[in-house]
Every structure is written in structure tokens, then in C-alpha cells.
Image: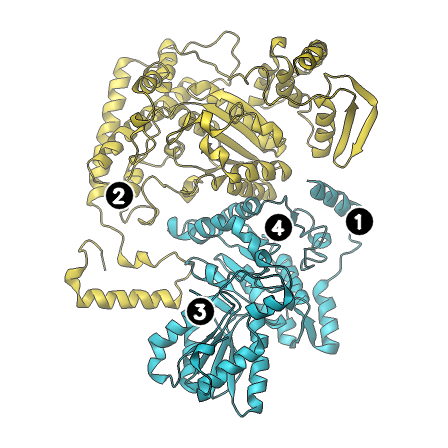
């Protein structure tokens, strides 16, 4: 309440002082360096979509005055006012339900979770209402909403702040689930998510927010948008396919670099979309390389890797020259101690070893991860 | 505690006298242009004997015109301690408003001395209470409301039997709650968006959903608006501004605040209206919704049908508070308790609440005291946990339909012949609707895969293709009533 009141006062008291064309600023910045941080990519995508469509609004804890727990919403309150950048009381089930209701009535809410771990307190609204309403009403009620926030393991914050929800939300029909890696992904996928008529779960990664990536002029254009359901081949190769999403794409690329020094050409697929899953890109790659390593930070059981493996077994079994390798997080809640935490999440070396096993079968199978 | 209470009762009365004088001045000021708002005044006539609590009822209206949340809080915080020895010169300038200091150490009691009274217009015999103040209802409107109540009652009887005969999988009646259903619906505008729980089909009926459309939904046939995708009684209709019913309890409450927020941003003259039971008030969603609606100043009416039972859980096992109405104040929400079996009282309260919500952009909580005269659903036999005498008492002595009928009869607006004719024609229409709905074609196979998303994704197209091929190969293994 106090936040909202304060905002109103501030918004009235500081007419346009901090208003600046965020997009233009980024464009200038990038035209000299052609680099953009993921944080800026998300911020500019939000800014552009809010500017293009008055129905888009942002809500969540600390998104306004505080500019987001990770500063993703920086400058948006000043620009769009407290009606469209809504600081909410601390009740995930409350603001998620309100977002869903607003979407029922034609607005396009972007709901920020401080971390996706906290979306568990609102999962009923996400699954039972957002994901199912269009179906249950036979198309009478669409729910154009985006649930976004950091997902997966951060660093040193323990079990309740470090979990990947890709497999959870990915298992639910009615939802679309996206997970960006680079700044290009972040911009293009978030814009696609906001424009999409269906509910989208948008899984970001805290550790990537501060990373910079090269971006092209096309990516910086306000009309830029990526297709939902399409993976990106980040690096072409011919000996083994490595699938990954979010932070693990970076690990897979590093692994591919190391493998190349040993004469192994790895193809790295950045999934981008967990649901719908781009099965055809994955299968086409496996049919070319005949080997597959899946990488994810989440738990192994019923995970994204398991689904990819099934798809390949179903569609390209005859093409496989080696058993599929699955790299995943350890099957335990995330420990806090740094040494144990490192052991619980995939490392670049794990991916390298798995790829080598798939190529040479020089390492015993049981030694996965 | 006892001495503390005694100590403050004197000052409480003095205070009340001061306030009632102030308020009577307010009520005698010329009424606002809106018809319903002029009836607000009747609530100010709380007898001084109600003590401390009447302040709670009275005070909000003294700031009726105020829309600034901050001012409200400031006043409320000061008013809290009005009846103690307030040292007005010593005030805590706290974030959000000033709070007066007091030297008296007094815990706020867990309950008021008397329970919040229940606003009613008609007594059990359908005779208006002396001095009753309510929104006038024309003959035409009254007859329409009564006819809808009888239709709802008949519909429940016939559809309930349909389920008992095994022709539909599930049903749930609104018996005993016909007045809350119909009178609240009649008090609203067609633009108001309804987020129902599941015991409010009367609202949809009032808005023009036909008996045939009800039957289609129960049968899940091709004509059903939901194309057979939602279980029986989970009605929904865009054109009637009635959001498809959600099974998990209380999810509709924060969603209603969200719809209200969207309506407010749109700048129209409509509100969101959501219904729930006494049991739902225990859900976290209820508390989240109340708090958010207050903070967001969302035009939403929360209508609680406190019907005494949440399946088999009686209200004394549901909460220790004086029902649901008192919870409104904790969230800064205006609230009223109303006799839910009194059609005129429900109508008046909802009409007035709607004026407040729409004109002042604020949430309002209405607790309607009623009784679930039927079983919870067709999966329940309530005689296992409550006495038949209790059920019969509410069905007969406190029947909302009969009570309203007596009032109509006393006005000579309704007679035995009208009654017979109405009941016969509704029953006939229902039986015909069932026949038509039962014979109608079931949803086609493609409906299985439609509407999961706005556009059918390729994996679902693949699944559909695969299913069709399998059916073609093994036609005998599949039911014949699925149009391919």
C-alpha cells in the first residue's frame, strides 16, 4: 500500500524527469559496441511492448519503485506510471490471480515472480486457471499473460531459491514455456511471449542477467520477434548433438570449444522453447550426427532431457550410433555450501566427458555426471 | 479485561452520541442523485445499545465522499481509539497515517460484544419490517424475479433427478439460495462481469441463459458453449459476461479483483462481481483478494453466501470470527451482513453496493446469511452429518421463495393460478430441453484437440492424425458416438 501511494506521489511530483527513450539509449550503446546485457534486453523488450500496446502492464513485488529485484523493470514506472507498473502486496497467489483475471478481461499482464521458486505459491492460478481456461471455455476465454522471472540455480542461495521449473511447467498443456539464453533470445522471445494469445511461462536466469552478448541491428529493431517453438542451432557440428537451454547453452558452447580441440565437432542446439518443443530440429540434428547429449540444470527424473530422449527414440532410433547421454542436476534439493552446490549442477567437464563417451565410448556408461 | 471494558463503555456512549448527532446531520443533507445511494442513510440508525461495534458500522459513512486511501487510514487510525482517553496532541506520525497514543493498555477484544446484525426487509411471513428501508421494486420486476426463482427451483429438481437416473455424471443444486442468486443478479447491470463459484446458476438464468443452454452444458453436447470440455454445472458464457466456473475453491476471488482492475483501467461504468461460500473464506485466495482489491481500489463486489455448511464442515469449525462480514474491515473494505433469504434485502444491498463500487472505485463485501437446503452435490448425502429437522426447518419456515411469494401475494401481484401456470410451463420446457439436449450430437473428435491453445500446435495435429488412423484401423474398439 505504501509503495503504491508513494508511487502516485512520485509520478505526480516528478513530471517526466526520468523519462528517457530506453530503446534509443540501448541502440546507441550497442551501435558502438554491438553488445547488450540480458538485463537490458529484457528491459527494452518490456519497454517496447508496453509502448506498442496499452493493454500490456507489469505487476509483481518490487517491480515499480524498486525497479525490480534484479532491475529488469528499470525506468518503466517513470515512463508508464503506477497504473501500468504495479507494485503489489506480497501474495503470489493474489497477484497471479489478479493477473489471470485481468487477462480474462482483455488486458495483457506481465507477472514478475521474484524467483520462479515463489511461483509455487501461485501455481493453482497458473495451471488450473491460466493454462486451462481457454480449453474449458472452448475458446471463449483466452488468457494472454506472461509469467516471468529468474529460474534455476543462482549461486549460494540454497534449495528454495535454486530450482528449475522447465519440466514442471513444460508438462502442462495450455502453457507455452520459453527459456532464453542470450540477449537476442531475451529480446525476441519476451516480445513474442507478450504478443502471444496464450499464457507463457518465461524462465530467465539470474546469473545471465549481467552477461553481455553481441547483438545485430535486426535484434535491436523494435519489430524484432522470435518464433515460439523454434530452437536455434548455436553452433553447427557433425559428430554429436548437444541440446541445452538457458545458462547451460553457454556451458554446452564451452564444451563444444574444448571438444573441437580434440577433433570432435559438436552441434549445439539452444532449445529456446521448452513447450512447444522443437522436435524436428532436434531429430534432424541427431540424424546428422547420430549421437545425442542432453543438458539441463533441473532434476533428471521426468525432465526436459527425458522428453528429448523419448522424442529421438520414437523418431530417430535407427539413426543412433550410441546411447543417449543425459546431463542433469543431481537428484537432490540444492545444497548451500559452495563445494556441494558445485557438485549438484552440471559442469562443462561433465558435458565434455559425456560427448566423448557418446563418440568413443571410452568411458564407462555408469559414470554419468 | 472486565474493568477495562467497563471503564471505556461510558466514554463509548458519549462518543456515540456525538457521532450520531454528526451523522444525522449528514443523513439529512440532500440525497445524491443516484437512487440507491439515498437508501444508505437507513444504516445510520443503529441504536446506541450496540456499543463499540456500531462505530464500525457508522464510521465508514462519515467518510463516504473520501476516495483518498491515505485520508481514510489517517481517520481510521485515530477513530480506533476515539472511545478511550486519546491524547490528541500526542500523535505518532507513522508511514501511512497518524496514530493517536493512549496511556490505556487495552487489547482489542477477539469479538465485539454483539454480533453484527443482519439487514432484512421482509420478515418470515413476507411482511415488510417496520421502518424498513430498501430499494423499491416494481410489480413487473418483482414478478420477473419471483418467476426466475421458481424456474431455478424447478430446474434444480428436474436436473437433480436426471443425475439420479444416471443420465448426467454430476449435479449441484442451489436449493435454499434462490434469493441470493436471483436478487443479486437483478440488482446488477448486464455489463458487470460475474466470476461465480458454482452455486449461482440463477445469475446466468437471470441474464438470459436458456433452459436449453443449461441442458446442453449438462449433457456436454455439440451445442454446449464449452463443447463438452467442462464438467456439469461449470457453465460459462461470454455473451452473458459470466466467466466459466473454476472448480478449485476461491480462485475466482483474486481473479475478480483482476477483472475489476481491468474494468477500472478501461474507465467504464461496470464492476466485477464474485460469489463464494463460507468455506471459501478460509482459503488463502480470499485473503489475498480482499487485500489486493482494497489496495488497488478495484470496483469488485464480493458476495459471500454463508450457507452454514462447507460440504460437511459447519461454520463453527470453519472460523472463530463473527462470520465473514467482520473480515472486511480488517482489509479496509466496506461490508454488510444481509438476510440472504430475503429477496428485497439482497436486492437493495447489492444495488447499493454496486453504486459504491462503480462510482467510488472500491471493493464491497456482502455476507448473505442463507442455508444450503440441498446436499452439497450429487456426491453427498448431508443427512449423515446434519439433522433432517434442521434441513426441514430451513426448507419450510425460512424458505426464501415462499417468503417473497407471500409479499407478492400481499400486494395482489400474484395468485394461485399464476403459480400453477408458471410451474407447469417451466417443467414442460425443461423436459423438452432435456430431450433435445440428449438427442443432440456429441462434440466431434477434433474438439478433443481444439482450444488447448489459440492455434492448434503441430504436436497436437500429429496426435489427432495418429488417433484418426488408429480409429480407422480398429473401428470396433472405439465408441460410435464420436463424430469423426
Contact between marks 3 and 2 (CB within 8 A): the answer is no
Q: Which residue is mark 2?
A: B219
> What secondary structure is found at the residue carrying circle 3?
loop
From mark 3 to mark 1, how far is it between C-alphas? Answer: 46 Å
Q: Point out the image quarter for the N terminus of chain B.
A: top right
- Whether labels 3 and 2 share one chain: no
Q: Is residue A94 left or right of residue B445?
A: right
Q: Position of residue A58 (x, y in %)?
A: 62, 53
Q: Position of residue A215 (x, y in %)?
A: 65, 76
- Whether labels 3 and 4 share one chain: yes
Q: Which residue is mark 4?
A: A59
Chain letter of the residue carrying label 4: A
| Along the line of sight, the residue nearer the viewer: B392 or A99 | B392
Q: Which residue is mark 1?
A: A14
Q: Which colour represents chain B?
A: yellow
Q: Is residue B49 left or right of residue B433?
A: right
Of discs 3 and 1, which sits in the foreground? 3
Q: Earlier in the sequence, mark 3 or mark 4?
A: 4
Relative to B54, say whether B335 is above or below. below
Q: Is residue A361 visible?
A: yes
Chain letter of the residue carrying label 1: A
Q: Is residue B154 left or right of residue A26?
A: left
Q: Which colour represents chain A?
A: cyan
- Whether labels 1 and 2 share one chain: no
From mark 1 to mark 2, how far is it between C-alphas? Answer: 59 Å
Q: Which residue is mark 3?
A: A277
From mark 3 to mark 2, how far is it between C-alphas? Answer: 36 Å
Amino acid at each position: 500500500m505504501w509503495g503504491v501511494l508513494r508511487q502516485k506521489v512520485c509520478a505526480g511530483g516528478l513530471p517526466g524527469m526520468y523519462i528517457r527513450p530506453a530503446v534509443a539509449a540501448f541502440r546507441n550503446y550497442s551501435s558502438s559496441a554491438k553488445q547488450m546485457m540480458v538485463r537490458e534486453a529484457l528491459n527494452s523488450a518490456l519497454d517496447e511492448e508496453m509502448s506498442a500496446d496499452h493493454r500490456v502492464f507489469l505487476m509483481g513485488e518490487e517491480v515499480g519503485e524498486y525497479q525490480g529485484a534484479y532491475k529488469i523493470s528499470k525506468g518503466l514506472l517513470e515512463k508508464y506510471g503506477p497504473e501500468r507498473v504495479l507494485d503489489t502486496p506480497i501474495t503470489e497467489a493474489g497477484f497471479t490471480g489478479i493477473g489471470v483475471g485481468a487477462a480474462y478481461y482483455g488486458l495483457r499482464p506481465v507477472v514478475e515472480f521474484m524467483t520462479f521458486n515463489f511461483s509455487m505459491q501461485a501455481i493453482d492460478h497458473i495451471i488450473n486457471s491460466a493454462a486451462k481456461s481457454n480449453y474449458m471455455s472452448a475458446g471463449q476465454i483466452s488468457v494472454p499473460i506472461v509469467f516471468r522471472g529468474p529460474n534455476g540455480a543462482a549461486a549460494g542461495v540454497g534449495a528454495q531459491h535454486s530450482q528449475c521449473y522447465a519440466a514442471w511447467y513444460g508438462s502442462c498443456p495450455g502453457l507455452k514455456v520459453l527459456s532464453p539464453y542470450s540477449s537476442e533470445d531475451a529480446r525476441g522471445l519476451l516480445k513474442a511471449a507478450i504478443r502471444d494469445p496464450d499464457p507463457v511461462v518465461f524462465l530467465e536466469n539470474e546469473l545471465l542477467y549481467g552477461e553481455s552478448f553481441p547483438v545485430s541491428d535486426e535484434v535491436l529493431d523494435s519489430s524484432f520477434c522470435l518464433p515460439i517453438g523454434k530452437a536455434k542451432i548455436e553452433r553447427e557440428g557433425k559428430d554429436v548433438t548437444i541440446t541445452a537451454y538457458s545458462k547451460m547453452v553457454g556451458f554446452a558452447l564451452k564444451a563444444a570449444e574444448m571438444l573441437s580441440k580434440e577433433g570432435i565437432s559438436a552441434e549445439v542446439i539452444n532449445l529456446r522453447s521448452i513447450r512447444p518443443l522443437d522436435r524436428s530440429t532436434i531429430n534432424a540434428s541427431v540424424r546428422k550426427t547420430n549421437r545425442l547429449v542432453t543438458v539441463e540444470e533441473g532434476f533428471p527424473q521426468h525432465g526436459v532431457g527425458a522428453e528429448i530422449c523419448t522424442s529421438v527414440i520414437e523418431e530417430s532410433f535407427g539413426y543412433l550410433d550410441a546411447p543417449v547421454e543425459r546431463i542433469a542436476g543431481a537428484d537432490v534439493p540444492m545444497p548451500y555450501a559452495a563445494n556441494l552446490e558445485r557438485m549438484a549442477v552440471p559442469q562443462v567437464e561433465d558435458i565434455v566427458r559425456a560427448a566423448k563417451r557418446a563418440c568413443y565410448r571410452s568411458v564407462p556408461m555408469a559414470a554419468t555426471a | 479485561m472486565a474493568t477495562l471494558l467497563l471503564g471505556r463503555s461510558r466514554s463509548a456512549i458519549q462518543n456515540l452520541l456525538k457521532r450520531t448527532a454528526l451523522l444525522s446531520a449528514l443523513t439529512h443533507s440532500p440525497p445524491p442523485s443516484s437512487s440507491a445511494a439515498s437508501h444508505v442513510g437507513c444504516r445510520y440508525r443503529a441504536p446506541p445499545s450496540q456499543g463499540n461495534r456500531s462505530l464500525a458500522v457508522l464510521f465508514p459513512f462519515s467518510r463516504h465522499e473520501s476516495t483518498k486511501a491515505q485520508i481514510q487510514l489517517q481517520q481510521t487510525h485515530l477513530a480506533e481509539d476515539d472511545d478511550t482517553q486519546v491524547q490528541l496532541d500526542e500523535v505518532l506520525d507513522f508511514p501511512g497515517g497518524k496514530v493517536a497514543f493512549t496511556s490505556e493498555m487495552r487489547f482489542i477484544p477477539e469479538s465485539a460484544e454483539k454480533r453484527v446484525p443482519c439487514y432484512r426487509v421482509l420478515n418470515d411471513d413476507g411482511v415488510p419490517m417496520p421502518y424498513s428501508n430498501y430499494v423499491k421494486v416494481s410489480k413487473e420486476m418483482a414478478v420477473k424475479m419471483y418467476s426466475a426463482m421458481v424456474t431455478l427451483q424447478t430446474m434444480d429438481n428436474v436436473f437433480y433427478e436426471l443425475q439420479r437416473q444416471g443420465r448426467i455424471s454430476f449435479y449441484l443444486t442451489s436449493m435454499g439460495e434462490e434469493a441470493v442468486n436471483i436478487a443479486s443478479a437483478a440488482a446488477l447491470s448486464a455489463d458487470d462481469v460475474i466470476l461465480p463459484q458454482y452455486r449461482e446458476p440463477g445469475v446466468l438464468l437471470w441474464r438470459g441463459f436458456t433452459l436449453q443452454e443449461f441442458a446442453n452444458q449438462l449433457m456436454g453436447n455439440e451445442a454446449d458453449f464449452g463443447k463438452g470440455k467442462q464438467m456439469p454445472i461449470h457453465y460459462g458464457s461470454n455473451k452473458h459476461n459470466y466467466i466459466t466456473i473454476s472448480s478449485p475453491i476461491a480462485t475466482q476471488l483474486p481473479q475478480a479483483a483482476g477483472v475489476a482492475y481491468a474494468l477500472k483501467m478501461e474507465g467504464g461504468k461496470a464492476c466485477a462481481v464474485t460469489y463464494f461460500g463460507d468455506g471459501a473464506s478460509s482459503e488463502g485466495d480470499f485473503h489475498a483478494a480482499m487485500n489486493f482489491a482494497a489496495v488497488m481500489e478495484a470496483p469488485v463486489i464480493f458476495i459471500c453466501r454463508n450457507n452454514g455448511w462447507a460440504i460437511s464442515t459447519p461454520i463453527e469449525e470453519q472460523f472463530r470470527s463473527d462470520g465473514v462480514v467482520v473480515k472486511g474491515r480488517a482489509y479496509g473494505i466496506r461490508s454488510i451482513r444481509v438476510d440472504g433469504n430475503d429477496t428485497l434485502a439482497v436486492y437493495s444491498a447489492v444495488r447499493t453496493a454496486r453504486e459504491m463500487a462503480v462510482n467510488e472505485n472500491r471493493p464491497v463485501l456482502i455476507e448473505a446469511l442463507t442455508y444450503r437446503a440441498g446436499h452439497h452435490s450429487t456426491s453427498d448425502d448431508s443427512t449423515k452429518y446434519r439433522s433432517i429437522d434442521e434441513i426441514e426447518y430451513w426448507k419450510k419456515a425460512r424458505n426464501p421463495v415462499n417468503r417473497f411469494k407471500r409479499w407478492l401475494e400481499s400486494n395482489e401481484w400474484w395468485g394461485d393460478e399464476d403459480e400453477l401456470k408458471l410451474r407447469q410451463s417451466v417443467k414442460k420446457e425443461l423436459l423438452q430441453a432435456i430431450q433435445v439436449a440428449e438427442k443432440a450430437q456429441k462434440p466431434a473428435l477434433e474438439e478433443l484437440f481444439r482450444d488447448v491453445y489459440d492455434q492448434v500446435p503441430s504436436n497436437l495435429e500429429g496426435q489427432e492424425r495418429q488417433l484418426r488412423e488408429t480409429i480407422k484401423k480398429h473401428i470396433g474398439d472405439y465408441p460410435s458416438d464420436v463424430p469423426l
